[in-house]
Image: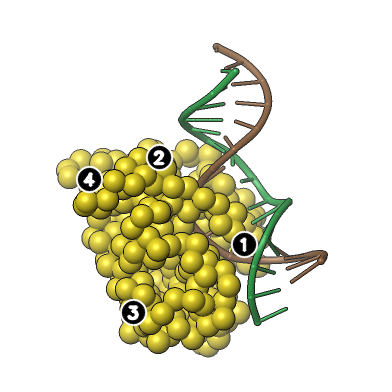
Chain colours: A yellow, B green, C brown
DNA sequence: CCCACGACCTGTGGGC
DNA sequence: TGCCCACAGGTCGTGG
């Protein structure tokens, strides 16, 4: 589930406790997630100091003083939670997400100051890796990744090049991480609705003004979603175990059969399957 | 290169 | 209540 806004929210929540922290204990409670953990995973991390916490697309990156970078992808159901923070920090404004099932606590990190961060992942579509920090951008994992949607490189001119002579729907291509990094099924549907572009429209046939609208809508949706702490459908929670609340602002995602909320639109939201994934859109607002 | 589709894994909600 | 199917935030590999 976690798309860019959720990953960014988790990163921000972990940042204060992990920046500059030394890991005094690391436990891998199984040898693999989606892929095997890298050789010597626990050993290479134990005693390492985390420099900063960064994000690229849907990946959390923790460069270490050892010269390696810990890479974490949350897959569909991955959660990173600071232990003992649920009671302490979510008692206020934010609703608490459902508690993670302890049987899916696969990796534990403990800092020198006694803070424990647990990685939970029911479906185990997430993964972790340790790679040399030098040349990280050229690592196969990142070399072909598209630009960050909130940075200037993601522009209408860029999209025009990326979409050129592509017959697939705009929806499918925006989901492609080599075109733009970080978008997933929720935010692509929401962004195309804001842009007034049909998800079924062949990407290569979109004229420049429509690409301008898509770029603006993608940025606006991501900014709004980050400000809302992401979207919690089922499993997602931030580092403090709190739910996001952008799901309450969905205009189309998960709203099949319900009225379009655009004023004065009276059409009903449709669901179609594209590239094996559900797409939600308004047939009247999106052309 | 482009595109469609199944695989990976577990849980949950709906229909009967 | 119970069973079975469809579906879920994401990639990745294969085959045409």
Q: Residue furthest left?
A: A92
Whole-percent x, y for residue A125 in the image: 57, 54
Q: Is residue A138 left or right of residue A195?
A: right
* Residue at mark 1 shares a chain with residue at mark 2: yes
Q: Secondary structure at mark 3?
A: helix
- Whether tag 3 and tag 1 are in contact, CB under 8 A, the answer is no
At horizontal 62% and vertical 50% (from top left) the residue drawn is A30
Residue closest to the eye, A220 or A61:
A220
Residue A250 in view, yes or no: no
Whole-percent x, y for residue A196 in the image: 34, 64
At horizontal 58% and vertical 72% (from top left) the residue drawn is A167
Question: Based on the displayed image, in which of its 4 quarters is residue A16 positioned?
Answer: bottom left
- Choose mark 3 or mark 4, whichever is in front: 3
**Mark toward the start of the polypeptide (3 vs 1):** 1
- The chain to which mark 2 is attached is A
- Choose mark 4 or mark 2, whichever is in front: 2
Residue A257's label in the rendered image is 2
**Mark toward the start of the polypeptide (3 vs 2):** 3
Say which residue label 3 marks: A209
At horizontal 39% and vertical 47% (from top left) the residue drawn is A269
At horizontal 38% and vertical 77% (from top left) the residue drawn is A211
Say which residue label 4 marks: A94
- Vertical comparison of A95 with A25: above or below: above
Say which residue label 1 marks: A37
**Mark toward the start of the polypeptide (1 vs 4):** 1
Q: CA distance from mark 1 to mark 4?
A: 33 Å
Q: Is residue A16 left or right of residue B6?
A: left
- The chain to which mark 3 is attached is A
Q: Quadrant of the C terminus of chain A?
A: bottom left
Q: CA distance from mark 3 to mark 2?
A: 30 Å
* Residue at mark 3 shares a chain with residue at mark 1: yes
Residue closest to the eye, A285 or B11:
A285
């Amino acid at each position: 589930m976690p798309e860019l806004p959720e990953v960014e929210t988790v990163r921000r929540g972990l940042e204060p406790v992990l920046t500059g922290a030394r890991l005094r204990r690391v436990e891998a409670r199984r040898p693999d997630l989606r892929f095997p953990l890298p050789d010597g995973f626990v050993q290479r991390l134990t005693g390492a100091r985390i420099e900063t916490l960064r994000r690229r697309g849907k990946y959390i990156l923790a460069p270490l003083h050892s010269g390696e970078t810990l890479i974490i992808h949350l897959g569909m159901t991955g959660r990173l939670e600071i232990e003992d923070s649920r009671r302490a920090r979510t008692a206020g404004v934010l609703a608490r997400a459902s508690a993670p099932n302890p049987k899916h606590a696969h990796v534990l990190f403990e800092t020198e100051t006694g803070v424990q961060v647990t990685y939970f992942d029911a479906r185990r579509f997430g993964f972790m890796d340790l790679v040399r920090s030098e040349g990280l951008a050229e690592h196969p994992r990142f070399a072909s990744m598209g630009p960050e949607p909130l940075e200037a490189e993601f522009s209408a001119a860029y999209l025009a090049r990326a979409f050129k002579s592509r017959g697939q729907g705009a929806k499918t291509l925006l989901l492609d991480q080599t075109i733009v990094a970080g978008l997933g099924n929720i935010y692509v549907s929401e962004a195309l609705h804001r842009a007034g572009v049909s998800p079924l429209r062949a990407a290569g046939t979109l004229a420049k003004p429509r690409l301008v609208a898509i770029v603006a809508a993608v940025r606006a949706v991501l900014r709004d979603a980050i400000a809302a702490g992401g979207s919690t459908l089922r499993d997602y929670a931030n580092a403090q175990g709190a739910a996001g609340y952008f799901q309450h602002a969905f205009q189309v995602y998960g709203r099949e059969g319900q009225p379009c909320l655009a004023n004065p639109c009276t059409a009903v939201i449709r669901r179609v399957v594209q590239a094996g994934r559900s797409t939600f859109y308004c047939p009247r607002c999106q052309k």
